[in-house]
Image: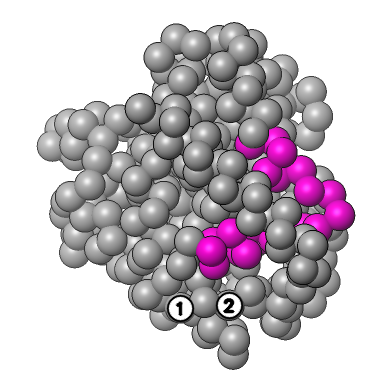
Amino acid sequence: MTALFASLLLAAGTIRGPMPILSTPYFDDGSIDYESLAAQTKFVAKWCPGIIWGQSNDSVDLVTHDERLKAFDTCAAAVAGDPVVLALGANGTNTAHMLEIAAAIERTAERHPTAHIAIISRPPNDARSEVDIECAWDALGAAVKRPVIFQTHGAKNVPEPSVELMVRLATRHPDVFGWIKEESAGDNANVRMVQENAAKPAIKAVLSGWGGWQWLYQLRQCGSEGLITERAAYAPILGTIWRLYESGERGAQLAEAYAMYRLLIDQRNFPGGLRGYSLYLLQKEGLCRSLVSRQYQHREVTEGGTFGWGEGWKLETVELADRQKAELDALYDDMMEFAKEAKK
């Protein structure tokens, strides 16, 4: 990492705080709406210190190479010169594919020198052992010249990287590695987060995952320094939670802000998944023109989101009843009022 880039990244607030993953907007025919993607990027940048694209299920495996490159440029151009970190996803079916995408991100950064671009990477889809993951990320560490966030959850049948492995790689490549999105299941995420923070300074920052369902606990008790989740529609409240926390707030006001966020994302009887009814809120903000998503042919829906596998994709459209729309309208208005009042 060059000294210039390091100073720019520090000026942008470093890799900390909420970094919502953009929900790729599509037209009704399933093609990417790049104009809306740029608008969504700018919207998140107004509220949060970081933005991510290329890391949600529909944008990891269900976009073409050319679509990915155009989206990289779209997001980078949207935040060029802004004090935010843009992390672009370098994930692949195998190590060679991951490195190809990482090289494309480096070229994107060259074309947009005033955008503060980092990388986020999950293990390649074909990794089946700790050795596989170490070899892949070791190659990535040698190939790039900007910070990389490790994502601990990968594709179906990919093992979880151990804390020891990530510390070892961060020690070996100190200018590239040291940031972690920790999303192990259940309390194991909290145990691992404490262990990862104990490995500082090799580990620089540990961020939460899983939609933020444990974020308040992890902020106050486990050393979380941010959140990565495909919840771009909720950037105003995520930014509010972070500003309160950074100001030293640890009590009722922080809990109230977090409760507002949980209310927004915990609509169990609404169409769910990582995108789901969130698209309706993005549409209200003028950040997507349809409620269409690309979806895996085979998928498993969990509390953490929708996880898919297999070749090809199909289109799905979120369908909401009028009473559901009315409730989402009310929740959206509450979020915006809460966030604007807290910002005063």
Q: Number of callouts in the render?
A: 2
Decide which of 243, 98 is in the foreground and name it: 243
x and y percentages locating residue 120 in the rendered image: 47, 47
Q: Residue at x 64, y 33 (%)?
A: 260
Q: Secondary structure at mark 1?
A: loop
Magenta stretch encompasses residue 118? no
Query: Which residue lies under the disc numbered 1?
Result: 33
What is the distance, in whole Å, between disc 1 and disc 2 at their CAs?
A: 9 Å
Q: Residue at x 37, y 64 (%)?
A: 39
Q: Is residue 139 left or right of residue 10?
A: right
Tell me the amino acid under the disc marked 2: Ser
Query: Which residue lies under the disc numbered 2?
Result: 290
x and y percentages locating residue 152 in the rendered image: 63, 39
Q: Which residue is the extreme one toward the left? A: 4
x and y percentages locating residue 237 in the rendered image: 52, 37
- The answer to which image quadrant residue 342 occupies is top left
User: In this picture, is 131 found above or below 286?
Assistant: above
Magenta stretch encompasses residue 278? yes
- The answer to which image quadrant residue 252 occupies is top right
- Can residue 203 be seen? no
Instruction: Find the magenta span and give its range.
Output: 261-284
Quarter of the figure with the N terminus: top left
Q: Residue at x 22, y 47 (%)?
A: 82
Q: Is residue 6 left or right of residue 300?
A: left
Q: Are marks 1 and 2 in contact (CB under 8 Å)?
A: yes
The crowding category of the residue bearing disc 1, from other C-alpha atoms within 10 Å (few below 14, some 14 to 19, many at least 20), is some
| Nearer the camera: disc 1 or disc 2 | 2
User: In this picture, is 18 found above or below 113?
Assistant: above
Q: Which mark is residue 294?
A: none
x and y percentages locating residue 220 in the rendered image: 60, 13
Tell me the amino acid under the disc marked 1: Asp
Disc nearer the start of the sequence (1/2): 1
